[in-house]
Image: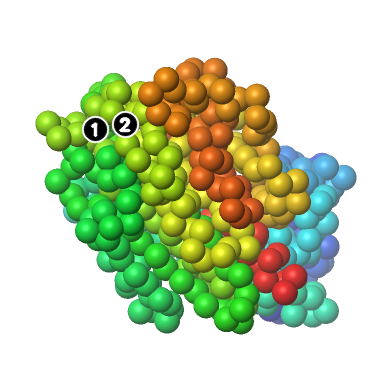
Amino acid sequence: MEFSIKNTQPEKQRAACIVVGVYETRQLSASAQQLDNLSQNHLTRILAMGDMDGRVGSTLMLHHAPDIGNDRVLLVGLGKAKELDRKAFLTSINAALAAINDTGAPNAALYLLEETVANADLRWKIEQTILAAQAQRHTAGKLKSKKDAPAKALKKLTLIVEPANNKTAEIALAEGRAIAAGVELAKDLGNLPGNICTPSYLAEQALDMSKEFSLKCEILERKDMEKLGMGALLAVTQGSRQPPKFIVLRHNGGKKTDAPVVLVGKGITFDAGGISLKPAAEMDEMKYDMCGAASVLGAIRAAAELKLPLNLIGVIPSCENLPDGQAVKPGDIVTSMSGQTIEILNTDAEGRLILCDALTYAERFDPAVVIDIATLTGACVIALGHHVSGLFTEDDALAGELERAGQAAHDRAWRMPLWEDYQSQLDSNFADMANIGGRPAGSITAACFLSRFTKKYNWAHLDIAGTAWKSGKEKGGTGRPVPLLVHFLLARAAAI
């Protein structure tokens, strides 16, 4: 979709649809009032008939309003002016976009961005509008022989701001486009089935991205992993006929001497649980077990498009976790790249096994910070549901950075404890540690396991099991936490 910033007054704007706000009860926004004056109080008369009262998310489409010069005027309810917060704004924006798309109007001009929204500046409103517009255009069924996308969809959206805000708006527009493209990439990768999105396919996407954005890409093969001693990762892939891939993608936007930010993404392209086989119900959703990898690719794409002045490295360990005669068995003991031994009590706790070797590999970059992103535990879904991602780190400053990034992006994370008290749940009689710590605090003990491989750098873990995809009727990838990660990178780049 095409987006642009303009300062045109409502009476001079020409578009297939012009969008203005109405507050409760039937109070016109400033732009709506200008149209009402132009049309000799036509809007006021329509509202007086009771068709709309301005409730949040309500809409009313007017056709050929007198003296306005636009085919359509869309009135959008904003609720009570004093209660217009982020949630209400997003509800109204999504309702407006849905109403426009239903008409088949090819373009529209939006006069909602200068409305006062509690705890939200213009940059936030523009970015969220772009993300909402792109999300409504996205279809999960791209492999269908008959596409779900409507034949006529909104192709151009003009965002109206005050002239004094042009510079801020253009920055927000660029950032919003880049984040939306990263989200779209992560969604598309997550939605692909396991027979298409294999570890090799992920590697190909990384290579293609490196060519498009002049990035550096290295793909490690099985023999490379064997030489490095990645016994934990290689154990997971034993039951699969698909070769594992270890992807390293670099955006060198900073000085050579600048320590990089390293993003590590779990890339299990299909997870049947291995010998500890998952229940058949909803196992199809385990194609989403590579959403951590997808979010890393999406975030790097956005950073490259924005030419962020920092060094960024994506590390993606990728394989399948399947049952087979050669698959790793419960009770097997493997040696990780770090030299620490692991008793595998449950083969379905495989994400932490591939991540621990990737986290050890990250040491060679002397990173400023390492963040791993993984659909790691069902326990995190039980703890936090589907609204926020789980955040684990021992560093208060890093936790604050990620929490602020999540708030800024409307892609929030909630900090969970990572205390020494939980470490003993990973004790093993036969190895340095077990790969599970029992049912209590499952997401915490998983993070505790990863923490044992991160002693040489500053580290945080994001458990996105509850936020990376939606189940049910609207099943599909969400693209999260790409917005959070990009805002984290934007803040880091601004501090340089």
Tag shown at residue 333: 2
| Crowd tier of the residue under label 1, counting other residues whose Cα lies within 10 Å: few below 14, some 14–19, many 20 or above | many
Residue 31, x across and y down, in percent: 78, 65
Given the image, on which type of amino acid does mark 2 rest?
A: Ile
Where does the image place residue 456, in percent across and percent down from the top left? 59, 53
Q: Position of residue 242 (x, y in %)?
A: 18, 49
Task: State the separation of the CA atoms marked 1 and 2.
Answer: 9 Å
Taking the spot 27% from the left edge, 45% from the top edge, the residue there is 234
- Residue 51, horizontal then vertical, whole percent: 68, 42
| Residue type marked 1 | Val
Quadrant, the C terminus: bottom right
Label number found at residue 328? 1
Considering the numbered disc 2 on the image, is that residue within a helix, a strand or a loop?
strand
Quarter of the figure with residue 416: top right
Residue ID at (34%, 29%): 344
Can you see residue 342? yes
